[in-house]
Image (cartoon, grey):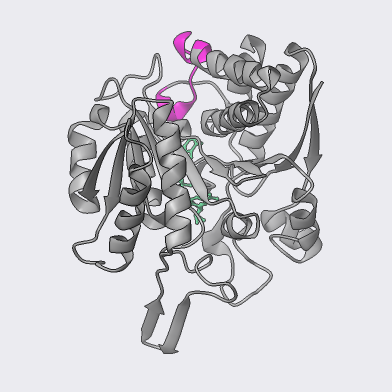
């Protein structure tokens, strides 16, 4: 018997809609794979948690997560969180540091039945997730943005040897199971010390992987190369903010954010979380594309399968992946991909294919 305890956190905006379909698909996989037992535990985060418990990330949620193997997190509408209210933390950023989810894996690839300008795209962005230019995760305590006077803001960017090295190791390890090529993306011509240290760490780790080809690019030029020849890139290892921006660009190359899954990876906890935000413009209309969230969970199951040498988790992941592809192939699509299916109709078809 393979038993995993999985937390379910809906989040804000389209979060409840896409997480519901993801759970539907996950439960279908559980029914289909003999001996796979998923204990799902709903935990509050986001604006609903604030209304009910006075915090967008109640401490009870964080404590409960520490007893889980993985979690599903819907997106959160952080731009409306009051910066002066300490109870309105960004659950996404806080969980990444609190649970040490140090690598954010964001794949972008072509899907059957989704026509785009590019073919043969299959890249994986491996983004540092716990420091960098993100003010809510680059200090042990407090926030890395300061206002010395009302007209000046200082934002700190943190790059450390330990976190850069372990991130690079994830990238090279994953590259070994793919096309054996890593692109290190940085801006060390200007951020000479921070990006310089990051690149040095990646080069050092690269020596442990002589079978993996390595190249490096300045992020600005890389953005152009990505759009000119996205099919050339395999694994992209980069710092927090560059990875965040480039992964939305990558999503745009293959059909949009509705197709962009993500996995936050720690040594003992995995958090499935789509790349996109809470899409307030379409929230509550049952038209959001649930693929990104569904495939985030598929990535989580696959990683659980690899880490635990568990064929059942791998089978569930494989079934979900194939089911999404079959659904797209038969022309069922949400409006962002030019279709007319609702979020829940799309989830029903994927679950039936599982
Ligand atoms: P967004 O990703 O929410 O939306 C950008 C565009 O993509 C919108 O037009 C939206 O409708 C569309 N889109 C996104 N996901 C989609 C889906 N699944 N199906 C169909 N269309 C989809 O980015 P934004 O508008 O910049 O941010 C909205 C809110 O989300 C903000 O509060 C932001 O802070 C927050 N945010 C949260 C996360 C997270 O929780 N991980 C990530 C990014 C942004």
Q: How many marks?
A: 0
Which residue is rendered at x = 24% and y = 58% of the image? 187
Which residue is rendered at x = 60% and y = 55% of the image? 100
Q: Position of residue 298 (x, y in %)?
A: 59, 27
Residue 30 relative to residue 302: left or right: right
Is residue 297 shown above or below 338?
below
Is residue 288 shown above or below 349?
below
Q: Name which quarter of the figure residue 37 lies in.
A: top right
Q: Position of residue 24 (x, y in %)?
A: 71, 25
Residue 289 visible: yes
Q: Position of residue 342 (x, y in %)?
A: 57, 25
In the foreground, 210 or 15: 210
Q: Position of residue 180 (x, y in %)?
A: 34, 29
Residue 289 relative to residue 32: left or right: left
Q: Name which quarter of the figure residue 25 lies in.
A: top right
Quarter of the picture holding the C terminus: top right
Which residue is rendered at x = 24% and y = 67% of the image? 192
The answer to whether residue 196 is magenta is: no
Residue 276 visible: no
The part of the chain drawn in magenta is 326-338
Is residue 41 shown above or below 342?
below
């Amino acid at each position: 018997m393979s038993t995993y305890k999985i937390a379910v956190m809906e989040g804000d905006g389209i979060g409840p809609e896409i997480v519901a379909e993801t759970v539907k698909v996950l439960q279908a996989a559980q029914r289909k794979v003999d001996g796979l037992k998923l204990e799902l535990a709903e935990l509050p985060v986001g604006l609903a948690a604030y209304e009910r418990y006075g915090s967008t990330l109640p401490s009870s949620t964080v404590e409960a997560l520490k007893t889980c193997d993985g979690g599903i997190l819907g997106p959160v509408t952080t731009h409306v969180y009051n910066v002066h209210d300490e109870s309105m933390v960004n659950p996404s950023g806080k969980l990444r540091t609190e649970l040490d989810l140090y690598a954010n894996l964001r794949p972008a690839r072509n899907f059957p039945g989704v026509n785009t300008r590019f073919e043969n795209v299959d890249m994986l962005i491996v983004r540092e997730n716990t420091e960098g230019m993100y003010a809510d995760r680059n200090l042990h305590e407090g926030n890395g943005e300061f206002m010395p006077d009302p007209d000046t803001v200082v934002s700190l960017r943190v790059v450390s040897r330990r976190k850069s090295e372990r991130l690079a190791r994830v990238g090279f390890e994953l590259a070994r199971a793919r096309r054996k090529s890593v692109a290190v993306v940085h801006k060390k011509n200007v951020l000479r010390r921070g990006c310089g240290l990051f690149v040095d760490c990646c080069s050092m780790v690269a020596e442990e992987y002589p079978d993996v080809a390595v190249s490096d690019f300045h992020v600005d030029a890389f953005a152009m190369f990505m759009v000119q020849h996205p099919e050339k890139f395999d694994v992209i290892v980069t710092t927090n903010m560059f990875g965040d921006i480039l992964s939305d660009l990558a999503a745009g190359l293959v059909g949009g954010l509705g197709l962009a899954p993500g996995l936050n990876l720690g040594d003992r906890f995995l958090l499935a979380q789509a790349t996109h935000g809470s899409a307030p413009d379409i929230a509550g209309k049952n038209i959001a594309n649930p693929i990104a969230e569904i495939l985030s969970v598929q990535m989580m199951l696959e990683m659980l399968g690899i880490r635990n040498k568990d064929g059942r988790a791998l089978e569930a992941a494989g079934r979900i992946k194939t089911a999404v592809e079959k659904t797209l192939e038969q022309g069922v699509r949400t409006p962002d991909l030019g279709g007319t299916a609702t979020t829940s109709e799309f989830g029903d078809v994927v679950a039936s294919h599982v």
